[in-house]
Image: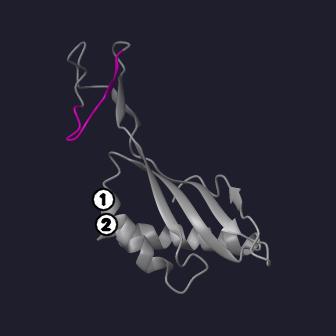
Amino acid sequence: MHEMSIAMAVVGQVEEAAEAGGARAVTLVRLQVGELAGVVPDALAFCFELACAGTVLEGAELVTVSEAGRARCADCPAEWAVGMPPRLCCPDCGRAGGVELVSGRELRILSVTWEDDPDGGPGRTREPISEEA
């Protein structure tokens, strides 16, 4: 299950940033997941919880923000939602060559919220901590 390797990579990157920022506890991680990234959100959430155990992220909430897959035709001005399974032929001119995916493959940490006040005061949010997970 590649969701576990993704979860471990996200936890590793967030843990590194949180430690550098003096975090006491990470409470929330927002992750952008493209429709075409091949990630099952429920499986990722399960794996994320397991990967967080024993780290500064233990108990953190994972919020996934879905990004629709979109494509653009190189031969005409058309841009469209590709859906699942992806429709990679231009709906306007019918051409399949030169189709460019413009969104939907993202896997990006959007923001992280952590507590850094030793008295349990409000945490802070850092956006983004990295380009790709």
Residue 52: give x, y in percent of width and height. 50, 78
Residue that numbered label 2 is attached to = 43
Quarter of the image for the N terminus: give it.
Answer: bottom left
Query: Which residue is at the far bottom?
Result: 54
Left/right placement of residue 59 relative to residue 75 reads right
Q: SS for tag 2?
A: helix
How many numbered tags mark residues here? Answer: 2
Q: SS for tag 1?
A: loop
* Residue type for callout 2: Ala
Residue 7 is labelled as none
Cα separation, mark 1 vs mark 2, equals 5 Å
Look at the numbered discs 1 and 2 and tell me whether their residues touch, using CB distance below 8 Å: yes
Left/right placement of residue 24 relative to residue 75 reads right
Residue that numbered label 1 is attached to = 40
Residue 126: give x, y in percent of width and height. 69, 57
Residue 75: give x, y in percent of width and height. 33, 15
* Residue type for callout 1: Val
Image quadrant where residue 123 sits: bottom right
- The main secondary structure of the magenta stretch is loop
Q: Residues within 10 Å of mark 2 (few under 14, many from 20)?
A: some
Query: Residue at horizontal 75%, vertical 72%?
Result: 20
Query: Residue at horizontal 79%, vertical 72%?
Result: 117
Check if residue 99 falls in the magenta segment.
no
Check if residue 84 falls in the magenta segment.
yes
Q: Which residues are magenta?
A: 78-87
Image quadrant where residue 84 sits: top left
Query: Residue at horizontal 42%, vertical 66%?
Result: 6
Whether 73 is drawn above or below 125: the answer is above
